Image: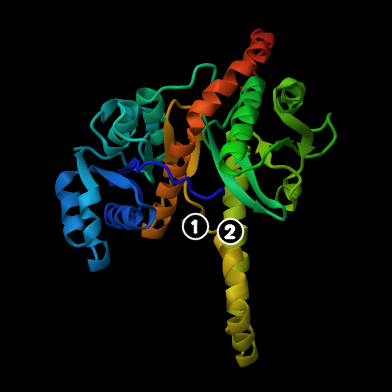
Amino acid sequence: MVGLVKLQRVLIAVDAMGGDHAPREMVRGAAAAVRRLEVDVALVGRRADVERELAELPAGDAAARQHLQVVEATEVVGMDEHPANAVRAKRDSSIVRVCREVAEGRAAAAVSAGNSGAVLAAALFTVGRIRGVSRPAIGAVFPSSRGQVFVLDVGANTDCRPEWLAQFAIMGSVFAKRMLGVSEPRVALLSNGEEPGKGSQLVQAAFPLLQSAPVHFTGNVEGRELFAGACDVAVCDGFTGNVVLKTAEGVGEFLLGAISEQAHKSLQGMLGGALLKPKLRPIRDRVDYRKTGGALLLGVDGEVVIAHGRSDAEAVISAVRVAADAAQRDVHGTVAGSMTQLAPIAAGVAGAEDIE
């Protein structure tokens, strides 16, 4: 990604109770982010739990305490709870409160590693949608041979309408310009073939809408071409995108694990591995969620970052970096301005048959 813009110090609200390793890793990651990124952080969660972790911060991060504040939230949404129901029932949960900090202007961005569906529901409930956006989308940055490719949706909407994919294309193009520094992002539609007639009913119906959208649409792209740099933005429904995301994570972990296993099988392998390690580390970092940070929720009227549920302190730092960068670049404001260009397209498909 483009380097963090150095503007005024921003406040990032972090859900201290979300994720598999909360609150310890969330608090430690937030403290380290304050020191490394020069941001302020509001830790949202049960005060007693958060204060206990703050008291046990490593000596190197203790000085960050003056830039950390605690926002009380008495409830927690579990990872296995129904997202919408949990958000309605637990109005004082850390997930709802962290989004409310953004909605009410106290924080520039929010970060949560909690139940991703609940984060989406809470963001819609408190922050609201950008006018003209039918459904927000979760985007993820993948490495490619030509740099990076931004894929959306990767989980917010398992079933989609064609016009939603056109909206995703516009939002993804804005992200690539603002966050990845691509002057004219190439936008493609993820399909099982490059030809215009290929793909599911959804893909075929979305194709002409993307052709008419105010983006640089290059046509269909197959999954194998994502990592070859065939496009800068790839658009798909949330079910397909989530399968792509989880498969890519699994393949990356498998390959790196297999290389490490083979390197430890012989002295020659260990020596070769030691020589290759400095060269392999940058490659590992490009596919490591701990380094790439969280996924920005595009389409809501504020910056909300969904971090990986397994986030440790290092992953929290990366997620805070994404949130601060998005806030300083005003990604949601730019998306809002761009969505007005989609109005004629949306009107043209208003009577289209649903394909959910």
Q: In this rendered view, identify the residue nearer to me: 53 or 37.
A: 37
State the residue at coordinates (21%, 45%): 69
Is residue 59 depicted above or below 131 in this figure? below
Q: Quadrant of residue 266?
A: bottom right
Give the mark nearer the N terminus: 1 vs 2.
Answer: 2
Name the colouring of the figure: rainbow
For the residue labelled by badge 2, is the local secondary structure a helix, a strand or a loop? helix
Is residue 58 depicted above or below 73 in this figure? below
The residue indicated by pointer 1 is 291
State the residue at coordinates (49%, 29%): 332
Q: Seen in the image, is 178 located left or right of residue 16?
A: right
Q: Quadrant of residue 275?
A: bottom right
Residue 103 in the image, given as x and y percentages of width and height: 34, 27
Residue 286 in the image, given as x and y percentages of width and height: 58, 58
Residue 286: mark in rendering: 2
For the residue labelled by badge 1, is the local secondary structure a helix, a strand or a loop? helix
Marks 1/2 in contact by CB < 8 Å: the verdict is yes
Which quarter of the figure is the C terminus placed in?
Answer: top right
Q: Seen in the image, is 98 located left or right of residue 291?
A: left
Tell me if mark 1 has few (under 14), some (14-19) or many (20+) residues whose alpha carbon lies within 10 angstroms of its own.
Answer: some
Q: Seen in the image, is 198 located left or right of residue 151?
A: right
In this view, which residue lies farthest toward the front?
7
Q: CA distance from mark 1 to mark 2?
A: 7 Å
The disc labelled 1 sits on which kind of residue? Lys
Q: Quadrant of residue 75?
A: top left
